[in-house]
Image (tube, rainbow, N blue to C red):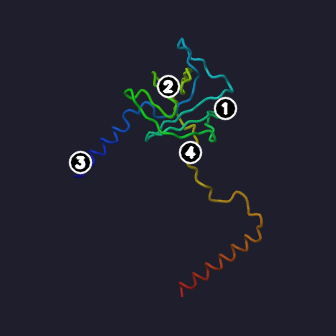
């Protein structure tokens, strides 16, 4: 029984990642592809789009800031994607991405313009999905005297409870 369950889980994991493998990772826009097949690079200062395909079937995309080599956290959108055409085409929202060689071509809606992307290696350019809150206060309270008094009262209260349980 355990062996059958292990085999089933292994097969499910292999089948769920098979088609997506070529898309997984982070992609940054190089430029636009012209009708003759040449790629016109993005000019300095112009908007670039970055994509991050993740498991399970999720994508994050947003504006890439080349100067800082990060994605603007205010521009990030999340979505799910589907894959077809033997794993070479993915769709999320009105966007269709198609792998071609080492690159990726993106078409948005009925716009005839094709955007070319290259895959990134190295550390992530996307901000974390969840940021842990800081454990300390960044600024002292407005009324530090009242804050100190409250801490003193809390300390005395804890001492009383501790004395009750010891005795």
Name which of mark 3 and mark 1 comes first in the sequence. Answer: 3
Name which of mark 2 and mark 3 comes first in the sequence. Answer: 3
Marks 2/3 in contact by CB < 8 Å: the verdict is no
Name which of mark 1 and mark 2 comes first in the sequence. Answer: 1
| Mark 1 neighbour class, 10 Å CA radius: few under 14, some 14 to 19, many 20 or more | few
Looking at the picture, does residue 111 appear above or below residue 74? above
| Mark 4 neighbour class, 10 Å CA radius: few under 14, some 14 to 19, many 20 or more | few
Name which of mark 4 and mark 2 comes first in the sequence. Answer: 2
Residue topped by disc 2: 104
Residue situated furthest left in the rendering: 1
Tell me: 73 left or right of 56. Answer: right
Which image quadrant for residue 46? top right
CA distance for labels 4 and 3 = 37 Å
Name which of mark 4 and mark 3 comes first in the sequence. Answer: 3
Marks 4/3 in contact by CB < 8 Å: the verdict is no
Looking at the picture, does residue 115 appear above or below residue 78? above
**Please, what secondary structure does the residue beneath circle 1 have?**
loop
| Mark 3 neighbour class, 10 Å CA radius: few under 14, some 14 to 19, many 20 or more | few
Residue situated furthest top in the rendering: 36
Residue topped by disc 1: 67
Residue topped by disc 4: 128
Marks 1/4 in contact by CB < 8 Å: the verdict is no
As rendered, which of 138 and 130 lies closer to the eye? 130
Looking at the picture, does residue 25 appear above or below residue 41? below
Residue topped by disc 3: 4
CA distance for labels 1 and 4 = 19 Å
Marks 4/2 in contact by CB < 8 Å: the verdict is no
Residue 167 x, y percent position in the rendering: 54, 88
CA distance for labels 4 and 2 = 24 Å
């Amino acid at each position: 029984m355990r062996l059958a369950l292990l085999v089933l889980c292994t097969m499910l994991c292999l089948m769920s990642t098979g088609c997506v493998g070529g898309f997984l990772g982070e992609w940054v826009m190089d430029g636009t592809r012209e009708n003759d097949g040449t790629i016109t690079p993005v000019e300095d200062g112009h908007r670039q789009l970055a994509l991050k395909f993740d498991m399970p079937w999720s994508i994050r995309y947003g504006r890439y800031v080349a100067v800082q080599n990060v994605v603007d956290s205010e521009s990030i959108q999340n979505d799910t994607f589907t894959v077809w055409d033997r794993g070479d085409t993915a769709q999320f929202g009105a966007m269709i991405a198609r792998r071609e060689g080492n690159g990726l071509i993106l078409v948005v809606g009925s716009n005839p313009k094709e955007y070319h992307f290259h895959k990134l290696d190295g550390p992530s350019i996307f901000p974390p999905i969840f940021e842990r809150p800081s454990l300390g206060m960044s600024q002292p309270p407005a009324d530090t005297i009242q804050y100190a008094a409250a801490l003193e009262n809390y300390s005395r209260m804890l001492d009383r409870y501790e004395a009750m349980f010891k005795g």
